[in-house]
Each structure stands twice: as C-alpha cells, then as structure tokens.
Image: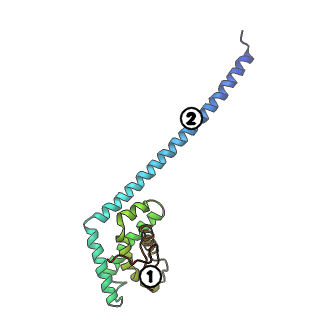
Amino acid sequence: MVSVSDVVTWLAAVSSLAVIVGVGFVVLQLRQNARLLEATLRQQRSDVTLSILERITDESFPRRRSEMHRILHHFAETDWKDAFGSPEGFEVRNFAQIYDLIAVMAKHQFIDLALLSDIMQGVIIRDWEVFAPYAKRIRAEYGFSRAYANFEWLAGEIQHRLGLVVVPPSGAAVGPSASSAPPPR
C-alpha cells in the first residue's frame, strides 16, 4: 500500500519538476517576445525609411531642392540681405530642417544610416555644402552654435561612409583618398 508520506514525496517531486519546466517555458516565451519586439522595431524602421523615400522621390522634392539652391545663391550674392526674415529664408530653413530631422532619426537608429547613405549619397552632401554658409550665418546671427548640427553630422557621416574626400575652405584635402581630387559636381 502507498502511504500518505509517499504520496506527499511524489507530489513534491512532481511540483518541483513542474516549476523547472515552467521556468523553461517562461524563458522560451521571453526569447520569443524579444524576437517579436526586434521584428516590430525592424518593421517600424522600414516604414520610416519608406516614408522618407516617398518624400524624397515625390515630384515636389527636386523643385524644393532646386529652389533652396537658387535662394541660397541669391542670398550669398546679396551679402545675406533679407536672408533671415523673408519668406524665402523660412522656406530654406524648413527644407534644411527636414535633413536635420532625418539626421536625428539616423542618430537614434530609427533610420538605417547605411541604407540612407546608399539611397541619398551625394544629395545630402551637396545640399549641406550649399547650406553650410547659411548655417554659419544663422549660428553667428542668432548665437545658436548647434543650429543644423545634425544636418552637418549627416553629411559628414555619408561622406565618410562613401569614402569621399573632404575639401575644407582652407583647400587642404582630408579623407581616405586625400591625394585625389573630389569628383566634379
């Protein structure tokens, strides 16, 4: 016959085994949840990247970009007269703000920087080169030393990733292939 103490011993062993098996299932569930969260984050990054891609392939983007270049050229020719209070100045700053926001998203890994570099390549670099004198004026005029710093960072990161030569205003080339001149634009 089976005594009560034998039954209690067996029940204790079975309950211990159930706890161990339960812990294993919890660990498996946590791993599965981590994979699901990772997949969700990848999907969100992809959605954000596609949204940006839609924006920059929209027919208005090249027109706005061209207008920004034209306005900045005009401001430089007129010694930055009306560069800060005019509607054109607001338009230029708004356009640059888009790049600044893209850079923030890239810094915080909401957008894959490698993918952004492959997609945009020289566009961001060239737009920064055109916008940089204006950013310098904004920084001096308003005392915002970090104005458009993210846009500047993004252009620099893409230059670095593409292995392009950086030619600062001093004329001394710096970069991976400083012995060769940058491609003409």
Q: Nearer the viewer, residue 6 or 32?
A: 32
The residue to which callout 2 is attached is 25
Going 47% across and 78% down the picture, which residue do you hit? Answer: 174
> Identity of the amino acid at label 1?
Pro
Q: Nearer the viewer, residue 178 or 5?
A: 178
Q: Is residue 164 above or below residue 44?
A: below
Query: In which quadrant of the rendered image does the C terminus lie?
Result: bottom left
Going 26% across and 68% down the picture, which residue do you hit? Answer: 60
Going 37% across and 63% down the picture, which residue do you hit? Answer: 118
Q: Which callout, 1 or 2, points to the residue nearer the camera?
A: 1
Asked whether the viewer can see residue 94, the reply is: no
Q: Secondary structure at mark 1?
A: loop
Q: Residue furthest front?
A: 179
Quadrant location of residue 124? bottom left
Q: Is residue 125 left or right of residue 61?
A: right
Q: Earlier in the sequence, mark 1 or mark 2?
A: 2
Give the x, y percent position of residue 139: 46, 82
